[in-house]
Image (spheres, coloured by chain):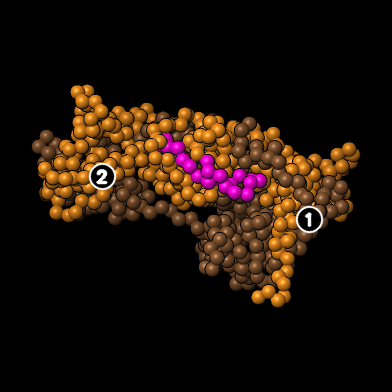
Amino acid sequence: MTAKPAAFGASDKLTLLLSLVPYLMDHDRVSVTTVAEHFGVPAARVRDAVNLIAMSGVPGETRQYLHGDLFDIQWDEFENNDTIVLTHLVAIDDSPRFSAREAAALIAGLQYLSALPENGDTDAIASLMAKLTRSSTGSPSQLAVSRTDGDEAISIIQAAVRAGTQVEFGYLTARGSAEHRRVDPLRIESVDNDWYLRGWCHLRGAMRTFRLDRMSDLRSTAVPADSHDDGVLLPDTLFVGSADDTTVTIEVPASALGLLADYAPVPTPTADGALTRAKLRVSHYHGLKRLVAGLAGVVTVVDPGEARQTVADWAAAGVARYDDDSGGRDDGSVGRDDGSVGAAADEVRP
Amino acid sequence: MSPTTEHQHPVTVEERLFSLVLALIATQIGLTKNEILSTVQGYRQRFQVGKDNSSLERQFERDKDDIRELGIPLETIESPDDPGSNHHLRYRIPKGLYDLPADITFSADEIMLLKLAATVWREGSLSAESRRALTKLNSLGIDSTDPVVGYAPFLRAREASFEPLSKAMDRGQVVAFLYLKPGESAPRRRVVSPQAVVLHEGRWHLYGTDQDAAATRTFLLSRIIGAVVALPGTGGHRADDGQGEQALAELDALWHAQTAAIIVEQGTDAAVRLGKRGVQVDSNSDSDSGSDSNSDSDSGDGQLVELHYTDLNILADELAGYGPEVFVRSPAALRDAVLLRLRLVRDSHAPFPETDR
């Protein structure tokens, strides 16, 4: 998971300039640090923007950008006290509207958040979405995110985070063993439809990430959670490698590498261009066999042989489930998808 | 002390764009291209009287696009005396359409919620869009309430097609791409007028009008192969309102209409994870009056789970990953698809011949 925020470009700088003007108009005297905090940008960026605003304006009747055609500030206050006092306005005095895509990004984010229990007030969310729509230049209807049903687990964990108490649950590891866990919950994270709890695991004595859908019998306890404010930092990535990870070589079409992005594959150049070899770090083969079996015909394990064998055994055991079934055919004549169901799934035309 | 009006420093992109916006808002009747290039800060320094200014004109065209992409309503007015003439076109930004409507206000709670909504996008163009939206929101000077602790929700739009499709929708263009339909071995070129991109059940879908079929279709972004190309000469065909909701409603209807019956082995990953998603039913449905507490002691006796789905092939991929933990009862097409995948994985992972090196 490598989340890269887009760089702060000219469009962002222009947006900041256009947004600062009405803000400064409403605030007679305001310090650079206050503005920087409010807008969530470095103070230096605010100073640059104010410098630029104070020297900008319209060509005016003379088309010479004369003094009266420009914004103005109290320069002494700005230069000596790092304080902004806007004294003359030009052309704009109000906040700009959102673009259709800006409004759409926020609306889709709201739709996603509406799965969270305390955002369950759908009327409030709907009214907010309507406001965003009215505040945008174009129609922001091109992006939509389906409502996922809020998991009960989210509410339980969230309440425990607030109360500062431990939670306990049964957890099935990817290796297949069930263990009882007691965790100081720190944060709920989600990636698309998958939800995770991150916290301090008392069984392991370390920070751990748990999938919510692998938990059973989740309940909150009255036991106070330990404080992890100092010393323990949550890494930004959900999955962190460990020293005992094994490296596995796989073969995959270059175009499909994106499917494995969570596992940070390291591609190696090969002679024939169609397939790429890549190295993956896995903690054990139990996760690998599930991953590869779920990407049939896309990913093939090359090395080590033990990993290949684990995957082959896993798939063979799956095939065997159908051997003694009257409906199963192991003569290779698997019924072709005639499109009657698959076509609807691919191209939806209800 | 006041700054001199003649700048000694080179004019930055943002200064040129800012000056252009100010000039076009300040004018009532609009400015011609020539007036803009010869008077507006950032252009006028490079404008050559009576000479060829074509590179400056191209710069102006790009700047117009950039400004419009920020939601600034830059209008073109034709001269009533000379309609159709490029030379007398006038440009302006009507202040009434630029300003946020006066009656729009946000509460501190709403600002907090919007800030959280913006953090949902942490990568790609939507994170930039969200960030700009927040900057505009911050201009209102409303402080937000304290954020909800302990959340880091995160949506990804990793598919390479996401960006060009969004752009094409913005400009109302028709696009072409290669699409690999399940059950077919080769991708086919599709020409589509995109109307919405929606996330349903964790997957991004394109909803649009297939130009060949002249009907709406839904495509999975993950099955778009290679580049999405906007067709020249198209554009300005804005999608109707509510297309996103319409697409989601259709996907929901399909999801509800399709049900798979599978048996999951007790105590396995499949039982825990799929069990939460499905409608659980007792596997011996004829004798379900008894308790279900002792059923897990019978080895091989799994639990029947019914799952809704939109895409048979995607469900088959997922179910194959569970290997022997899952047995598909119905539909037959799903069972075949899972079996096909498992055989493929088994056979492609057969031991290498010893001699082959």
Q: Which residue is mark 2?
A: B58
Is residue B299 shown in magenta?
Answer: no
Q: Position of residue A131 (x, y in %)?
A: 44, 31
Is residue B172 shown in magenta?
Answer: yes
Q: Is residue B16 above or below residue A177?
A: above
Q: Position of residue B315 (x, y in %)?
A: 68, 46
Chain letter of disc 2 in the image: B
Which image quarter: residue A134? top left
Name which residue type carries label 2: Arg
* Alpha carbon separation for disc pair 2 and 1: 62 Å
Q: Residue at x 67, y 66 (%)?
A: A284
Q: Residue at x 25, y 46 (%)?
A: B59
Which image quarter: residue B171? top left
Is residue A264 among the parts visible in the rendering? no
Name which residue type carries label 1: Val
Q: Residue at x 90, y 39 (%)?
A: B287
Give the chain coloured brown: A
Q: Is residue B217 above or below residue A300?
A: above
Task: Tell me the magenta residue range.
Answer: B171-190
Q: Which residue is mark 1?
A: A319
Classify mark 2: helix, strand or loop. Answer: helix
Is residue A344 among the parts visible in the rendering? yes
Q: Position of residue B167 (x, y in %)?
A: 42, 42
Give the chain coloured orange: B
Outermost residue, left side: A62
Q: Nearer the viewer, residue A111 or B291?
A: A111
Classify mark 1: helix, strand or loop. Answer: helix
Q: Position of residue A79 (x, y in %)?
A: 19, 53
